[in-house]
Amino acid sequence: MSFKEEVLKRLQLSKTEVVQGICPTCAERTMLISLTKEIYRCITCGGDLRQYINGKISYIPTTDMQKDNLSGEKV
Ligand SMILES: [Zn+2]
């Protein structure tokens, strides 16, 4: 199952929140899926992002969690 299929299935099964944003990892305007209240995942590159609020919302790559998964998953 591809990552996007997994995301779509997860969306059907749960109340996962989806936001639009610019992913700092792949620099694409994309959809971000909430995994927890503050962790979001980019559907383009699969990178996990931490939501960081300081007057405006921005996203920070959680690269330590994802290093091994960032290669090759681009669909
Ligand atoms: Zn991305």
Image (spheres, helix red, strand yellow):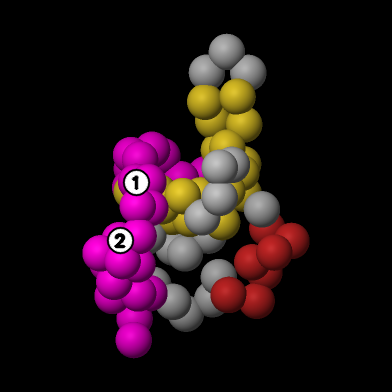
Q: Position of residue 9 (x, y in %)?
A: 29, 71
Q: Position of residue 63 (x, y in %)?
A: 68, 58
Disc ID at residue 11: 2
- The disc, 2 or 1, on the residue closer to the chain's N-terminal end is 2
> Label 2's element?
helix
Farthest residue, direction front: 14
Question: Does the CB distance between marks 2 and 1 fall below 8 Å?
Answer: yes
Badge nearest the viewer, 2 or 1 = 2
Mark 2: which amino acid?
A: Leu
Counting other residues with Cα less than 10 Å from the Cα at mark 2, is it few (<14), some (14-19), or many (20 or more)?
Answer: some
Front residue of this view, candidates 25 and 18: 18
At 62% from the left and 31% from the top, the residue drawn is 52
Q: Give me the residue at 63% from left, 18% from top.
A: 54
Report which quarter residue 11 is drawn in. Answer: bottom left
Which region is colored magenta? 1-30
Can residue 15 be seen by looking at this rendering?
A: yes
Q: At x 33% / y 39%, what residue is drawn?
A: 20
Q: Nearer the viewer, residue 44 or 3?
A: 3
**Residue pictured at 44% horizontal, 63% vertical:** 45
Label disc, if present, on residue 47 of the rendered structure: none
Label 1: element kind: strand
> Measured along the vertical axis of the image, is residue 57 above or below residue 2?
above
Mark 1, Cα crowd under 10 Å, few <14 / some 14-19 / many 20+, is some
**In the image, 55: left or right of 19?**
right
Front residue of 56/35: it is 35
For residue 18, the mark is 1
Which residue is farthest top?
55
- Gap between marks 2 and 1, in whole Å? 9 Å
